[in-house]
Every structure is written in C-alpha cells, then in structure tokens.
Image: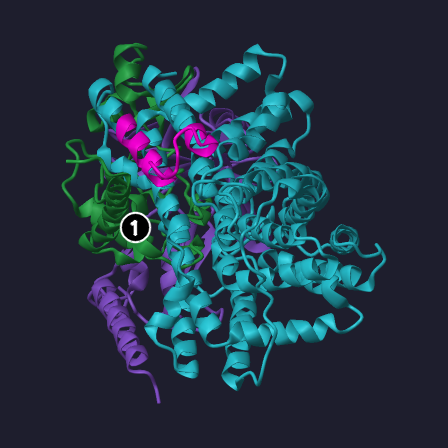
Chain colours: A green, B purple, C cyan
Amino acid sequence: MKWSPVKFNVAIMGILAVFLITIVANALASRQPWVLFCYKCKACDSSCILGIDPQGFVDAALAGDPRVYIYATNVRLRLSKAAAIDPNMVIVTDGGKVTARAALNELRIDPATEIVTYQVQARNAAQFCVRCGACERSCVLGLPLLRAINQLRDQKAPEVKVSHAQ
Amino acid sequence: MLSRTALKISFIILALTMAAFLIQKTLQQDFPGNYPKFAAPVNANFEFAGQHIRIGVPSELNDLRVFVFAYDSRGHMQAVVKAVEDGTIEVSEGDFSDIDVGFSQGNQIAGFEILKRMDSYTRQVDMAKALREANENGRQIGIQRCLYPVCTRCIDGCRSVIYGGDLPLEMRKSEDGAIVPVYSKGKCPRCGKCFVWCPVNVITTSGSLVGK
Amino acid sequence: MSVLGTISLLLFLTALIAALRGWIPQRVLTLQSVLVLTALVIILLRVIFGPHVVWAQVFTATSLHPITSTIAGFLFAGALQAAGGFQAAASMVARVTHTPLGLPFAIVVLVNFPTIFAMPCGRILAAPLMPLALMLGFEIARLHQDKTMVAMVVFGFLVNAGASCAPSLIGGLGLLGEGMGRFPMGAFAKPNEMGILAITVATMAVIRLHYGRSLKMRAEDMTTTPSGTIPESAYLSFILFFVVLVVVVAIRPPIPIQTILTLMTVVIMFVARLSFRDLLGGIMLHPLSALVAGYIVAGALLIAGGFEVLQAVLVLLAEHTVLGYIGVSVLIVFLPLFLAMPCGRIISVSLIPGVLMFGGRVAEASGFALAPAVLLSSFVLSSAASCGPSPLGGVGNIGEGRLRIRGFWSSRPQSLGIFLGVPLAALLVPLHGIQPAFDLGFSLIMLLIGATVGLLTNVLFGYRFWHIGGIAGGLLVGGLMVML
C-alpha cells in the first residue's frame, strides 16, 4: 500500500479521538460522571491532614484504574506494612524518595520502622483516608469526592488491613 | 419561529443533563431518628523512654488514626496523626506536629493550621519534644479520637438541618485537653446525621428516641 | 536518575524541536502526529526496558477542563457571532472610540479583559472575544498604516488570556499552587494579576520593537463596520454574556464554567433563533488536537520518569554548579517557558514539589521567609502563561490560525513578554503578603501599575503618552482588579 501522509495523520487524529473517548467512557463506567467536570485546581489538596491529593481519586476514575499512583505525603505506617500493601509505594526516607521494596531490600531499613508515604495507589489512599470530608468542603465546584473515595474503599481490599476501621 | 434544529439540540442537552443527574443520583440516605451517643475519653498511658514515647491505648482503637496532642506554652494544641497498632502508638524524635490549633476564650476553637505541605513543613514542631515539655510543665497531653477541627462532618450534618447559628452540637476543649463534641439535648432534632456521618465512631447512635 | 527517563526526555525535546524547526515538514507529519509517535516510542521503550508500571497512569496527565473549556468557548463564540453579538459589541466599541477616550482605552480594556474576569481556563474568554481583538487590531492598524499593531493587540490579548488562569479563584492554576503549597486560597492572585498586566504590555512592546519585522500575515482586514440596524437580540446576547461573566466572577457559583457557557449558548440560540450549524463556524480543531496530543506525550513522559529526571538535573545543577539554589530557582521559574505545554497544569503538578523544596532551601540560605511564596507564585504565573506561547495547541495558536501567520510565530514574543513580566509579580508578593485581604496601600499600587500600563500602551500604539484613553483604561483595569 502506498504511503500517504494525509491518511497517516488522519489515523493519528483517530488515536486522539479514541484517547478522549476512553477517558469519558472510564468516567461513566466508574459511575462517577462528575469527575469530568473537575478543574484539577487542587484547591482540595491543602485541606487533607494525611497529605492525600483528593484529585488523585478523580484521576483514578478518569483512568479507569484504582491502581494509579497519587500523592499521599503524610500517611505514617510501618515499613513492613507498606511493603505488604504495595512494594512499589513511594516512601520518604533520609536518603530521599524510594519504593518500599527498595527501602527493605536495598537500603536495609528495619521493617518495624515507621515511614511516611509519598505516592501510593489511589485504592490504598482511599483505605488510608479518614473520610473527614475536608476535601469536599474546599472544592470550588463542591464535587462529591467522598463518593469516589467510598467506591474505591468498597472495591477489593488489599491483602493487609490498613484502613480507618469502620 | 424557533429553528427545528435548535429545538432538537435543546432537547438533546436537556436529555443529557437529566441522564447525568440520574446517573449521579444515589439513593436517598436514610438517617435513623435517634439521639446521638458520645464515645468516652481515651485512657492513654504515656511511657517516656529514650528517644521514643510509647503510648498504650485501648485495643478497640487498633487500626484507627488518632491525634496525639500536647499543649504548648501559648496554649495552642500541637497534634500529630498516628495509627494505633497492637494497642500502642509510638512517637519518636523527628515526628513533627501536623496541626496547630488555637483557642479563644471559653475553650472554643479559634482556628487551626495544617503544618505540612507536600514533603516539607511550614513550621517544624517536634512532637516528642512537645509531649515531654508539656508533661514536665503540667500542660495537657493525650489522645484525641475525634478528628475535629480537620473533620467537621457532624457539624456539617447538624448545620444542614438547623438554620441559624444555634446548633445543638458544638465542639469544645474538654478538661483533659481533647476536643470533644458537646450537645444540648433540648435543641437536637434527632436527625441522626451526626452519627451516620461521623467517620471515626466518636458519635454513635444511642438507639433511643428519648436519649438514654 | 533513570536512563529510560533521560532518553524519554531527550526524545521528547528532540521531536519537539524537530517539528518546530521544520526538520520534520508539517505537510508530511503534523505536530500532533510527531507528538503521538514520540509518545508511542516512549511507551514502547518503557514496555521493553522499564520495571512494573500502571499503564492507566498515562491518562492522569490529561486535564479535560481546558479541552471542554475550548469547545464551550468556541461554541459560544459561534453563537455570539451568528447572533450578531460582535456587531453589537463593535457598535458599542465604536461609540467609545468616538469619545475622547478613543482606541487606546478600548485596547487597554480588551487586552486585559481576560485577567479582570479571570476564568479557570484562558480559552473560555479567548475564543469568544477573539473577533473583538481582531476588529480593534485591524482598526488601529488601518489608522496608523502599521500591520504589526494587529499582532500586538491579538497576542497581547492572547498572552493575557493564557496567563489569566493563574489568578482565577474559580479553579485556576493559581489554586493548584496555593493548594499544593498550602498557602491561603487567593494568596497569589493580586500580585499575579499585576504580573499579567506587565506580561501583556511587554509582549506588545517586543512585537512592536522587534518581532513585528518578521510578521507575514495573510488574513484580510476584519474590521466589522456595523451596517444597517443591529437586531435587539444581538445586543441582548452580548449583554447576557457580560452580565453572566460579572456574576460568575463575583459570586463564584459551584457550577462548572463550561456548563454555564453551554447554557448561555442554548439561550442565545433561542433568543436569536440559531441552528446548530451556526455554532460550528468558530470551531478550530488544531489547538484542540494538539492539546490532546500534548497530554498523551506528557502522560508517556510521566510513566517513563522524564519529569523526575528533569527535577534531578535541577538539583544536580543547584548542588554542583555556580548557579546554586538561588540561580536554579530562577531557572525553575522559567522552566515552563522552555517546555511550554498546552496547559500549565501538566508541568506544575510534576514540578511544584521541587519548587517548594527549592523555596525552602532559598529561605534557609537567605533568611528570607517568604522565599517559597515568591518562588511558587512566580512559577505558577510563568506556568499558567506558558500555554500562550506553547506550540502544542497553546492559546497563541488560536491567534496564529485567525491571522493566518506562520505557526508558532508568536511563541518568542510571548515568551519574552512573560520573561519580563513575571519578576514584577515576584516583587509584589512580599508587599502584598500571603493573607488575601483588602489593603489600601496595595490597592493604590495596583492602580498605579494600571495607569503605567495605560501610559505604555499609548506610546506603543503611536499616541502621546499622556493620552487620556490609555490612562483611563489602565486605571479602570487596575480598579476592577482591586474590586473583583
């Protein structure tokens, strides 16, 4: 078949359209269509005591995957537990930001040490969340962020219980 | 005459709006019409040893996140959010305060500031040091299960049914220094929102229409 | 610093430069195609050489908000155009220009309009007000026999629109900085508004003084001479637009601005009896598709660790070169200009943690406690404004399309304008403080800056610097910014 730049460029436009449609479909499939309206302004970010970026829950719905990594910069837990939940979770150590796996296996940090998280999967962040609703109150559009958090919590729980017991 | 296409588009927009509304609409939440009941203050046992402070708490708090607090010389509460594991909480040097709470006259909360931004602090208050200093100087230290003033779910619920500022539920500093919910039974409309929405089970249902 | 991240970043920069320099001809591969192919190559490299990854992370770099804002803005512009709203506006502007205030007044107010009524995305106002900017631009160009003036008005207006999401309190990029940095909401808004005034006038100045010489414009004169009777519905449409803007900015309702804009479009359709076809006239696909392609490549860079490499390079430069933390801080503020993305949010989310860290180090080194605030507010402004010069479907592309000039021509003057204007915002942060409250002294400074901008606009458009129109326009702009 003869190479045609026009056809090729049109095909690329098709990829762009599919990309956008996928995002919209993900939002609808997650039964949280309101995430399509999020300004991503992060006004909610400043209100979370656990340093969780609530907009990350919106990202998870748009991406259609609760495993996307989001900021959670102030969750304290034992290293062993962090590694059990998700070895690829990014944590803060004296040497900088590393994965929980690297902290255990390469840096040889005591598993009983309490660490502070930096980036975790959205579904784990939802489990850590204390559901105080501060993010909802600070949202300029009043988006129902707790709805997305509760939905993520209700999905298959990680193997280790880390939740705010309810 | 109104263009046919315009009319069609308007109907489509209207239909889409309604569909979006219906998709979003969850079932009406059912609030039990009972009086609330409040959890007892947490009995905590502080052990100051070396660089670490071990705090023994009832095992019913396991897996919960609570505030460990200490009052500073200005009368402000410094608190750090800690998870309870196996009935203990450990505070070590280098654990910085997450929140600074100021009080006005009458033990009412005047305001608060979250001290951590991303991976740095606007102000570093070492909690181990703050706990030791408060303990040595006779200032209050303790565990607060309620996450007020960060969490205001009960007050939000109350405010959604009571118009005006005279709420049956308010937050005050108790004698042991923890912030606790206080309510006036006579004003309470028994809507049940406070205990349904409380995420930490500090407020639960009394299971009673007369408030036992 | 990962090898994969470094390769990805270099690949992206090479592809971008190749597309912009014409090494890859646009008639063979469009910019969008180059970006998508680059993203695919980066993703492929990630599959072959990278460790575990959550693929859906690619989507998280995407922000639908600027896309929907652009579509809503274009549809609304189409409705306004078909309803004769611009003819009505042109007739109102003509009345103003026949007063002693003249064209300088209209130009100062129009080019700064997006920042006065700051929306969460500059495209919301850029699209519907573009015909007015074109009209005024051609009018003044005809008067002075200088086509450069069209570009001055259009790109002054567009850079202002692009940057205007920084001070917007209804979900703008400024809130992103304030949220992540835990500063009070609106802490940087006023200094940033003043910075944008400076950016706008600086962009117009550099076009006039230097870049105008290389301008080759193929667009016809678009002066709209109001002819015949303008229907009442045309005035009604434009007034509705204006009133809704004022209400939205003043009361900040918790409704997405796109919804409001779409509802207004429907109302105008009813009022002026328009068909759906009428709305489509204003739609431009290039900025939209480039925006989406930009998000895809940003998502690919995100999973490949490209942004982490960028941050690591900055830390290396700060620790091992003479630049130090202060030197690199200046570099980091203008980094969004070197890597101008279609929406400043892409780079902001990735780099703000680094900005805060640098701010902290500068504060320690200099003893200047407000250093993190100054650095962050400057970064946010530069980041927001960077969507003006971005060749990846930035706001500037709308102007290039309408004026039919070479793609990305406006990138350099806009970048230089931003480079000159951002320091003013940085200087004003310590004066304003980080608690947003009414301050008489600062309000007077804002009025003074407004008047100065008016004076400079007078000079740039060939009027005597004391022309009342420019000064009054500048004072009005400053006054509205104080109030709103």
Kindly state the secondary structure of the residue where label 1 is placed.
Answer: loop
Which quarter of the image is occupied by the C terminus of chain C?
bottom right
Q: Image point 51% across, 54% down: which residue?
A: C122
**In this view of the protein, which residue sits in the foreground, C63 or C130?**
C130
Q: Which residues are magenta?
A: C17-42
| B157 horizontally vs C466: left or right | left
**In this view of the protein, which residue sits in the foreground, B187 or C153?**
C153
Provide the residue designation for mark 1. B199
Q: Is residue A120 visible?
A: yes
The part of the image, by quadrant, that contains residue C272 is: bottom left
Q: Image point 69% across, 39% down: which residue?
A: C210
The amino acid on which the numbered mark 1 sits, given as a three-letter code, is Pro
The part of the image, by quadrant, that contains residue C224 is: bottom right
Q: Does the magenta segment cover residue C302? A: no
Residue furthest to the bottom in view is B1
Residue B61: x and y, percent?
27, 38
Output the chain of dot 1: B
**In this view of the protein, which residue sits in the foreground, A25 or C275?**
C275
10 Å neighbourhood of mark 1: few (<14), some, or many (≥20)?
many
Residue C205: x and y, percent?
71, 45
| A56 horizontally vs C77: left or right | left
Residue C38: x and y, percent?
32, 30
Q: Does the magenta segment cover residue C23? A: yes
| B46 horizontally vs C374: left or right | left
| C63 horizontally vs A24: left or right | right
* Main SS, magenta residues: helix
Q: Is residue B33 above or below residue B126?
A: below
The part of the image, by quadrant, that contains residue C334 is: top right
Residue furthest to the front in view is A2
Which quarter of the image is occupied by the N terminus of chain C?
top left
Q: Is residue B198 visible?
A: no
